[in-house]
Each structure stands twice: as structure tokens, then as C-alpha cells.
Image (tube, helix red, strand yellow):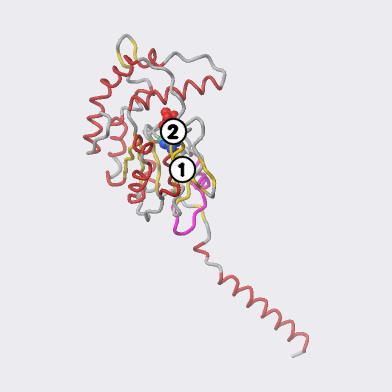
Amino acid sequence: MDKRIFSSFLSGFILASIFFSLISLINFEALPEKRLPSAVIMGVRKCGTRALLQFLSLHRDIEIAKEEVHFFNRKWSNGLDWYLSQMPTVKRHQISVEKTPGYFISFQAPSRIYAVNSAAKLLLIVREPVARAISDYTQIFNNRLARNKSKLAEFDNLAIKNGRVMGNYKPISTSIYHLHIRKWLDIFNPNSIHIIDGDNLIRNPLEELRKVEKFLQLDPFINNSMIYYNSTRKFYCMKKDSKNICLGSTKGRSHRPVTNQTIETLKKFYYPHNKEFFKIVNRTFSWN
Ligand SMILES: Nc1ncnc2c1ncn2[C@@H]1O[C@H](COP(=O)(O)OS(=O)(=O)O)[C@@H](OP(=O)(O)O)[C@H]1O
């Protein structure tokens, strides 16, 4: 063989060998990729869904979708590829988690989630229903103010009219937890749903996070060194990448003023609904 042909053949062979050796060094399975969420925080609005998601992001095996996705309630027509594109990239050992509080009260969300992933793990965080309703109203009030819309009537007048609690008023009806959880239990096995005590998440986040790690079948990883109590904010905050991170100012803000009479009337209103919820989920909470 001509010497020139031989040497170009040899250098081609060597280059190809180097190329294929490099390729074989890459572990494709370990490359980050987008995957549908194994766990979904499905609500309840104003019960600590953001705090729960951010605390979970401290876990080395969890990546979170940063924004609320609203796929199963509002954006179903965008299709599954769009949903996937909203997910974070995860490594092989990691799971992705998304939170959209609106799923809890949506009629379509349970069957749609089941259709996409019948093994989905659902996280539901609940809070004392009267405080949740007032927090919900406060958010609506402040949003209108920010958008320069006409001022909303006060909560006392919207929640109770002529002595009757307005059960259909959304801030009130969202707190009737048993009405909504039924739709989920019609479709999902109770073992697929883990309920987090939102009031306890405020007081003792690690206790609740430990239970979530167990439910998600992850190693206990989040620990005391990753969170701290911020006495100015009066909430637990996170230490992440050598930074101290608290939730934004819309979390834990002062509620709109509500009379004691309204609070007492609402407590009485929710009492039988709470009992019903406890019965269905086979568990009680510090509120009744
Ligand atoms: N660690 C920590 N820091 C700040 N806030 C915390 C925390 N843990 C729970 N919470 C409570 O979260 C409430 C807001 O709930 P959500 O995040 O579910 O609200 S939203 O539906 O996404 O708008 C928010 O409700 P409000 O106090 O009524 O504003 C908080 O009480």
C-alpha cells in the first residue's frame, strides 16, 4: 500500500478510536433529562404549598418546577410535551415535583393526573380552614389593589350575608376540604395521597418533611443544618448554597381585619365539615 494512503488510514483509525472511547466514557443514563413529576403538590391554596415545595428542594434527590404549572386544571390542551417542557432537568436518581394549588378544587385534575401517571404520589397540605379562607381573601384583596381595580368589600360582608355563611363563595368553599378530597379518593388509592399538616409545617417543618421523605421513598436527608428560624419573619427559612432564603413577602403577610363574630360563625360552620374530612381521611388535626 502506498505510504501516504497507509498513514492517512492509520490517523483516521486513531481518531475514530479516540472518538468512540470518549463516547463510551459518557454515561448517558446519568445525563440530566426532563421527566414527568413523580409527585405533585395538588393544594390546598394558602396552606403552605410554596413553603413545602421549597423545603423539598433541599433534598438532593428532588428537583422542583419553579413556577406553578396549572397543566391538569387549565392548560391540558397544551399537551403532554408542553407539560414535560415545564419540568426541571433531573439526574437519574432524582425525581421532579411540581405544585399547583388549583388542582385540589379542579373537577378534571384527578382523572387527568391518573391518566398521565396512575402511580403519581400526591401531596396535599391543609391548614385550619378559617385562617385559610381569610388568607385566600387577603390575597384576592391585595391582587385587586395591585391592579388598581375597585376596592373589594370586606371579608365579613362577603363571607356572611344576613347571618348565613356563603358556602359557595370561593374562599369559603375551598376550605370545605371533604367536598374536594372525595373526587380524588374516587380515583386514587388513599395510599397515593399524603396529607401534610400546614399548621405544623409552620411550627415544625422538619417533622412534616421527614414524613414526606418517607412517603416519597427517599432517604431522610433534609436536616436542621438546612433550615433556621427567622425571628423577624417569624417563619422558618432555608440555607441553600451558602445563602439564607426566606419565602417572598406575600407569604406570611398580615391578613385583612375580620371581626371575632365572623370568625366564631365560620368556626361553627366548618365544624361538621371538618369532622367529615377527618372521617374520610381517617385522621384528625389540631383544629376542629
Ligand atoms: N416557612 C414559611 N414561610 C412563609 N410562609 C409559610 C411558611 N410555612 C408556611 N407558610 C404559610 O404559607 C402560606 C401561603 O400558602 P401557599 O404558599 O400555599 O400560598 S399560594 O396558594 O401558593 O398562594 C402563608 O399564609 P399566610 O400567612 O396567610 O400568608 C404562610 O402562613
The relative height of residue 69 versus residue 148 in the rendered view (above or below) is below
Q: Identify the amino acid type marked 2.
A: Lys
Is the distance from the Cβ of mark 2 to the nearest ligand 1 atom less than 8 Å? Answer: no
Q: Residue 98's mark?
A: none
**Which residue is rendered at x = 27% and y = 33% of the image?**
286
Side of 245 relative to 183 (left or right): right
Percent x, y of residue 120? 37, 48
Looking at this rendering, what residue extends furthest in the front direction?
Answer: 231
Q: Identify the amino acid type marked 1.
A: Gln
**Which residue is rendered at x = 45% and y = 54% of the image?**
60
Quarter of the image holding residue 42? Answer: top left
Percent x, y of residue 11? 71, 80
Side of 145 relative to 186 (left or right): right
**Which residue is rendered at x = 54% and y = 49% of the image?**
242
Q: CA distance from mark 1 to mark 2?
A: 17 Å
According to the image, label 1 marks what residue?
Answer: 54
According to the image, label 2 marks what residue?
Answer: 234
Looking at this rendering, what residue extends furthest in the bottom direction?
Answer: 1
Q: What is the secondary structure assignment of the residue under circle 1?
A: helix
Quarter of the image containing the C terminus? top left
Mark 1, residues whose alpha carbon is within 10 Å: few (<14), some, or many (≥20)?
some
The answer to which of 100 and 258 lies nearer the viewer is 258
Which span of residues is magenta-colored?
78-95
**Which residue is rendered at x = 74% and y = 90% of the image?**
1
Question: How many labels were placed on the picture?
Answer: 2
Quarter of the image holding residue 124? Answer: top left
